[in-house]
Image (cartoon, rainbow, N blue to C red):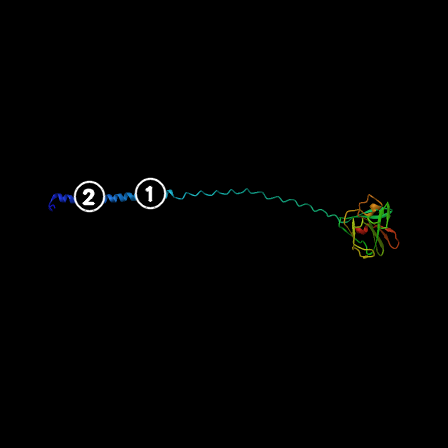
């Protein structure tokens, strides 16, 4: 053990103190350096993971404005043809009316009176009323009124027309007589004139004289 006044002991103490101070400062400096390095690393990490800037959405290009549609011209109205066509016709020395209408048309009585139906066939060049089976049957429809009698000659029963009245039936003006089921011509075409295309041939006579009269006004009006 050195004596307290030994100069070497005091020098050692100073040296030890200086060494401790140096070590303390070194530790502080090292800690500061380590902090700076850590902060720098954190800054790099934050920079690396930063959210990329968003690309602005493309602006929609407006569609071109189309010119207003030009309205189609409205067609001019056309007159609807009358369902029943009636024209004057002469044959067998008679003044007649030729009638034509669409298939499915119902012919009505032109006068008020009583119905009489006679049925004929055309066999071997002759007009007969004997009712031969399998041959077309052509009706003559008479409507006898107070001052006139009208005779209508349509096409064949069932093949061209459907009868809507029976023999002896009373009818008034406008009551149904028969309806066309096909476009066949009147029996007049078979019996007398093969050029006839009308569905019905009509004649009329005055009563009680029996004189023939023009039937056309009965179907065309005054």
Q: Where is residue 147 in the image (x, y as percent from the top left)?
A: 85, 55
Name the image quarter holding residue 171: bottom right
How packed is label 2: few (under 14 Cα within 10 Å), some, or many (20 or more)?
few
The quarter of the displayed image where residue 28 is located:
top left
| Residue plotted at (26% across, 43% down) | 30
In three-dimensional space, the C-alpha distance between marks 2 and 1, rounded to whole angstroms, equals 33 Å
Residue to which mark 1 is pinned: 41
| Residue drawn at (22%, 44%) of the image | 23
Q: How crowded is mark 1: few (under 14 residues within 10 Å), some or many (20 or more)?
A: few
Judge whether residue 122 can be spotted in this image.
yes
**Residue 222 visible:** no
What label sits on residue 19 in the rendered view? 2
Looking at the picture, how far across and down is residue 62, in whole percent? 52, 43
> With respect to residue 70, does 144 lie above or below?
below
Residue furthest to the right in view is 209
Residue 188, image x and y in percent?
A: 83, 47
The count of marks equals 2
- Which label sits on residue 168? none
Give percent across and percent down for residue 130.
Answer: 86, 50
With 191 as the anchor, is 26 left or right in this view?
A: left
Q: Residue at x 18, y 44 (%)?
A: 16
Q: Which of 50 and 135 is in front in this view?
A: 135
In the image, farthest residue toward the bottom:
170
Q: Which of 23 and 211 is in front in this view?
A: 23
Mark 2 lies on a secondary structure that is helix
Circle nearer the N terminus (2, 1): 2
Kindly check if marks 2 and 1 are in contact, taking CB atoms under 8 A apart as contact. no
């Amino acid at each position: 053990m050195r004596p307290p006044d030994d100069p070497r002991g005091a020098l050692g103490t100073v040296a030890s103190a200086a060494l401790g101070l140096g070590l303390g400062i070194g530790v502080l400096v090292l800690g500061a350096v380590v902090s700076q390095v850590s902060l720098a690393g954190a800054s790099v990490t934050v920079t690396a993971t930063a959210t990329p800037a968003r690309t602005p959405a493309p602006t929609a290009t407006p569609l071109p404005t189309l010119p207003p549609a030009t309205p189609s011209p409205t067609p001019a109205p056309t007159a609807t043809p009358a369902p029943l066509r009636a024209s004057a016709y002469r044959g067998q020395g008679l003044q007649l009316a030729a009638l034509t209408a669409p298939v499915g048309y119902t012919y009505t009585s032109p006068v008020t009176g009583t119905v009489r139906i006679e049925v004929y066939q055309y066999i071997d060049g002759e007009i007969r009323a004997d009712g031969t089976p399998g041959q077309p049957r052509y009706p003559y429809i008479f409507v006898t009124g107070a001052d006139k009698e009208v005779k209508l000659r349509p096409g064949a029963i069932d093949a061209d027309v459907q009868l809507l009245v029976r023999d002896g039936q009373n009818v008034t003006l406008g009551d149904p007589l028969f309806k066309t089921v096909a476009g066949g011509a009147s029996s007049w075409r078979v019996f007398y004139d093969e050029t006839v295309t009308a569905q019905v041939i009509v004649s009329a006579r005055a009563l009680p004289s029996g004189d023939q009269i023009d039937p056309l006004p009965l179907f065309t009006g005054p």
